[in-house]
Image: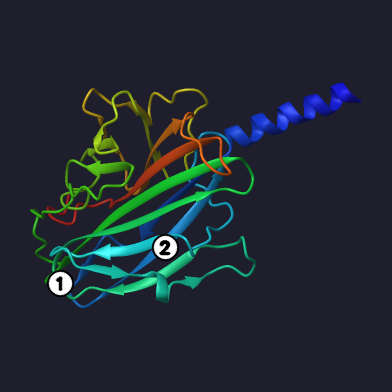
Amino acid sequence: MLRLLCALTICFGLSTSLLAHDTWVQINTNLIRTGDLVHVDLMLGNHGNGHRDFKLASKIDIGPSTLEVIAPGGEKYDLKPNAIDTGYAPKEGFWSARFTAAEPGLHLVAHTVDRVVAYAPKRTVKSAKTFFVVSESLDRVPEEHSGFDRVLGHPLELVATANPVTPMGPGQPIRVQALYQGKPLSGARIAFIPRGQALEEGFDEIYERLADEQGRASFTPKEGNYYLVVVHHDEPEQKGEGYDYTHYSATLTVFVPQVCPCCGE
């Protein structure tokens, strides 16, 4: 009986150490006309496989989270007060908020959360981003936009190093840089996950990259889809009250249209 209890304890410890919760934000469209609205969704996936897919599981407690839109001029708009719960049960669905854009240019959606989880003695620190462009005309969308490489100072952060909205389409690379405490995270394992695709176990040669010395990596999509860019980082020595280690995660969601909004190809 003692051996059985020890074995169960070990198995439980392994399962909780492998369990990783990733949050991400996504929008229903990456291009709108001035004065129109977007729907911003805050998602949670419960992934015990190192986040090898794009599937929802459970729903985050929005209370300790931040969720905001940063306009081209730097103004910040808090989306939490008007976010609605799309699920019937407490752990079903996701959070969704509407945002009406009055200013043309590139807008950044940002989310953060920092908490000690209930299922393991672990502190989780998360950040998530996505982008959309507001244009005076959908027929003549400007290609140049500033602000996509804005560094927000998240403990672990994915920064776009190329505009992820315009131009964007099949054949246009998604370029990112992983920063930890503001410095490049060399050798970071960065996944570029298409919605509907489960990555191979181990290291997926198609959808994963190892960051260079500057924490940079890129992936060129072959078709239109949502792509979830994910990086993780563990700090076993970062301990505190109620937790034995700290797990960091950062995501960046990129909507790749089948046709580029600028050139129409």
Residue depicted at x 25% and y 38%: 182
Can you tell which mark lies on residue 128? Answer: none
Q: Amino acid at mark 1?
A: Glu
Horizontal and vertical percent position of residue 173: 22, 38
Residue depicted at x 19% and y 67%: 75
In this view, the residue in front, 167 or 157, is 157
Q: Which residue is mark 2?
A: 41
Image vertical order of residue 127 relative to residue 198, above or below: below
In this view, the residue in front, 138 or 232, is 232
Horizontal and vertical percent position of residue 12: 71, 33
Task: Specify few, some or many for label 1: CA neighbours under 10 Å numbering under 14, 14-19, or 20 or more.
Answer: some
Q: Describe residue 133's horizontal placement relative to residue 188 as left or right.
A: left
Task: Specify few, some or many for label 2: CA neighbours under 10 Å numbering under 14, 14-19, or 20 or more.
Answer: many
Horizontal and vertical percent position of residue 27: 35, 61
Q: Which residue is mark 1?
A: 103
Residue depicted at x 47% and y 38%: 247
SS of the residue at dot 2? strand
Q: Describe residue 134's horizontal placement relative to residue 77 as left or right.
A: left
Image vertical order of residue 252 relative to residue 74, above or below: above
Q: Describe residue 50's horizontal placement relative to residue 186 as left or right.
A: right
In this view, the residue in front, 152 or 265, is 152
> Is residue 40 visible to us here?
yes
> Is residue 20 visible to us here?
no
SS of the residue at dot 1? loop
Report the residue that reaches farthest toward the front.
241
